[in-house]
Image (cartoon, rainbow, N blue to C red):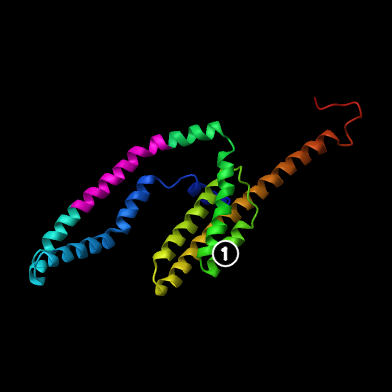
Amino acid sequence: MRHPVSSAMKTLDRPMLPWRVVGGAFLHFALLTYLLVGLGSCAAGLLSGLTFAELAAHALTYSAWFATGYLTLALSGTAAAVLLDPPLRRRQRRLAERDPNAATQQSYQNLVDVLEEGRARLDPVAVAQLEAIAAQEWHHEQLAFQMISADFSKVVRTSIAAMATASSERREEITAVTVAALSRIADGLHDLHLERSRLDEGDLRTVARYIDGRYSPSNSAGDSVY
């Protein structure tokens, strides 16, 4: 039977690839960019003497040109992220080899920064959730905890950015999404603690069996297991 931490560990072992982040950002801001560029073009057209009817006639052409240009830019940016990913990862590995404690220190620093930034900018409900997560036992020297720490930081900082640009009507929904994401982080951390406890108990039982065999009454005082 699989332990519940297995699925969490599998997910943590697959880091977010840069091209996914870049591609997702282009998709996320496509509509907003279209509207902003369109408004800018309309303003420039009105200043140059075009009528609203003339601007409307050019709307279809503008949309086609925008879609082509934006798609080209999105594909170029995503392709660049794909090409840059391997050398960046190699550089990270080299730095980690030079300083084996760098990942541990970064994991710890993530929690410090998250608490400071989150307390200042997030809703009290989300702050209570992140403080509860940060207050748990963390083993920053372990890779699984380092990955959760990085994801924890990513959730909080993305939420802070979303809250900064959201209208007052949207803030409640953003807080709900943030709390849900933090709950998943808490679940992953809980699973890691369960797995660590299970392994520690297994180590204890192994040592206990060894001691039982070595010092059982059937062994004479002069006997040795070696």
* The magenta segment: 69-88
Q: Is residue 72 magenta?
A: yes
| Closer-to-camera residue (33/144) | 33
Left/right of residue 201 with respect to residue 25 in the rendered view: right
Question: Closer to the camera, 8 or 202?
Answer: 8
Give the image quarter of residue 38. Answer: bottom left
Residue at the location (16% across, 63% down)?
Answer: 44
Where does the image place residue 177, in percent across and percent down from the top left?
Answer: 46, 65
Camera-nearest residue between 215 and 27: 27
Q: Residue at x 46, y 45 (%)?
A: 14
| Percent coordinates x, y for residue 125 in the rendering | 54, 69
Q: Is residue 64 left or right of residue 197?
A: left
Rendering quarter of residue 35: bottom left
Question: Where residue 39 appears, x then y in whole percent?
Answer: 21, 65
Residue 4 visible, this orientation: no
Specify the quadrant of the image occupied by residue 79.
top left
The front one of 8 and 216 is 8
Residue 62, compared with residue 7, is above or below; it is below
Disc 1 target residue: 129
Residue 1: x, y in percent? 58, 50
- In the shown orientation, is residue 222 left or right of residue 33? right
* Residue at x 15% of width, y 55% of height: 65
Query: Could you say whether the residue bearing mark 1 is in a helix, strand or loop?
Result: helix
Is residue 101 rendered magenta in the image? no
